[in-house]
Image (tube, rainbow, N blue to C red):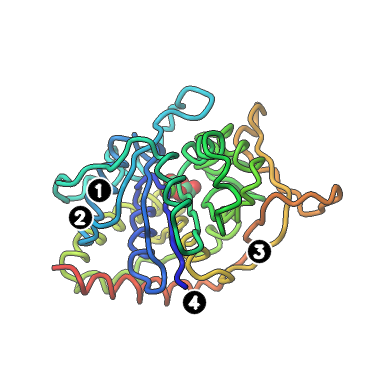
């Protein structure tokens, strides 16, 4: 029995790496991708999902678009355009997609894929949780059918957008709160683990000999590294989304701890904080928090998977 993967995403440079990783690994099958507004507007994140799949020669993977506006509040000005560029992929030279979305109702698409999958489904959300909040509202019957739910989002300790909030949660805090209360039991791959892994620029040197894949990923990762370098003063990036994908495709690659996690939706200073209680005094567990990963193992597996994928692209 294989493992079926559904990806909810806002590509996004590190999302592109995560999607490539999922497509590159044997034993898992990506059965669909849904798009959400986040790193860029929905029109761009959807365009990027379609053109990336076309670039990878994987137009067999269906894409459905979802929500641009957050679950319960107007879109906030993020000011985060420098991270991924206005189009979400740093202006990369990739042709317009020739394919189209199969649906503009991401929650209905996800629900149907979950219902009909013969294999256990892992849902991986690597953008804001807007589509997933609507999924649990509109199709609650699928909640117990999801074998595993892994998110990139949150931070038990230190945030990135603010001292305590991580971008995906901060972008749509009410959606995240709804999802943590839904019974889906997210594995929260947050900044506690993603900030512990630094992907130094030299790890990407192989891209210069990797043909067209190398050109495209060299461009987007170069731009991402420039941003990180201006922010943190080091030529490295944090591969947030590929790390969440790693826990989805290789369960157990991280250490996890049971927790009760809730999201602050009002705090003047703490909006979007994932308040993570591992003391479990009330005995209620609604998810797990990821704490550690062996960065060398992650890099070895990531680079080997991506170079295999690169070899399939002209
Ligand atoms: C998360 O925010 C986005 O910018 C990245 O794609 C990742 O999903 C990291 O905070
Ligand atoms: Ca993302």
x, y (%) of residue 247? Answer: 52, 65
Of the two numbered discs 1 and 4 on the same chain, state the one appearing first in sequence.
Answer: 1
The secondary structure type at the circle numbered 2 is helix
Asked if the residue under mark 3 is in contact with the one under mark 4, i.e. CB atoms within 8 Å, the reply is no
Write down the residue under mark 3: 256
- Which mark lies nearer to you, 4 or 2? 2
Q: How busy is the neighbourhood of tag 4: few (under 14 within 10 Å), some, or many (20 plus)?
A: few
The image's mark for residue 50 is: 1
Give whichever of discs 4 and 2 has the lower sequence position.
2
Vertical relation: 25 (above or below) 157: below
Q: Residue at x 34, y 34 (%)?
A: 41
Measure how far apart labels 3 and 2 are at the Cα level.
35 Å
Q: Nearer the viewer, residue 186 or 109?
A: 109
Q: Position of residue 298 (x, y in %)?
A: 47, 72
Callout 3 secondary element: strand
Q: Are marks 2 and 1 in contact (CB under 8 Å)?
A: yes
Q: What label does residue 54 carry, if any?
A: 2
């Amino acid at each position: 029995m294989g493992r079926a993967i559904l990806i909810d995403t806002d590509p996004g440079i590190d999302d592109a790496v995560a999607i490539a990783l999922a497509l590159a690994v044997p034993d898992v099958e990506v059965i669909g991708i849904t798009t959400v507004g986040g790193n860029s507007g929905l029109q761009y994140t959807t365009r990027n999902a379609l053109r990336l799949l076309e670039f990878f020669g994987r137009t067999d993977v269906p894409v459905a678009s979802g929500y641009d506006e957050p679950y319960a509040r107007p879109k906030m000005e993020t000011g985060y355009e420098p991270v991924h560029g206005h189009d979400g992929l740093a202006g990369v030279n990739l042709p317009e997609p020739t394919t189209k979305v199969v649906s503009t109702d991401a929650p209905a698409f996800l629900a149907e894929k979950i219902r009909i999958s013969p294999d256990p489904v892992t849902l991986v959300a690597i953008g804001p949780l807007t589509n997933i909040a609507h999924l649990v509202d509109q199709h609650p019957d699928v909640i117990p059918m999801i074998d595993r739910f892994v998110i990139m989002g949150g931070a038990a300790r230190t945030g990135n957008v603010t001292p305590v909030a991580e971008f995906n949660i901060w972008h749509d805090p009410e959606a995240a709160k709804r999802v943590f209360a839904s019974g889906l039991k997210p594995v929260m791959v947050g900044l506690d683990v993603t900030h512990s892994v630094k992907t130094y620029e030299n790890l990407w040197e192989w891209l210069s000999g990797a043909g067209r894949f190398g050109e495209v990923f060299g461009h987007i990762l170069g731009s991402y590294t420039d941003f990180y370098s201006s922010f943190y003063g080091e030529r490295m990036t944090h591969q947030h989304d590929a790390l969440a994908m790693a826990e989805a495709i290789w369960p157990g690659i991280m250490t996890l701890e049971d927790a009760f996690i809730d999201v602050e939706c009002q705090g003047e200073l703490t909006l979007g904080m994932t308040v993570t209680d591992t003391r479990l005094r009330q005995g209620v567990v609604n998810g797990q928090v990821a704490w550690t990963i062996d960065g060398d193992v992650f890099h070895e597996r990531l680079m080997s998977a991506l170079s295999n994928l690169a070899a399939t692209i002209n």
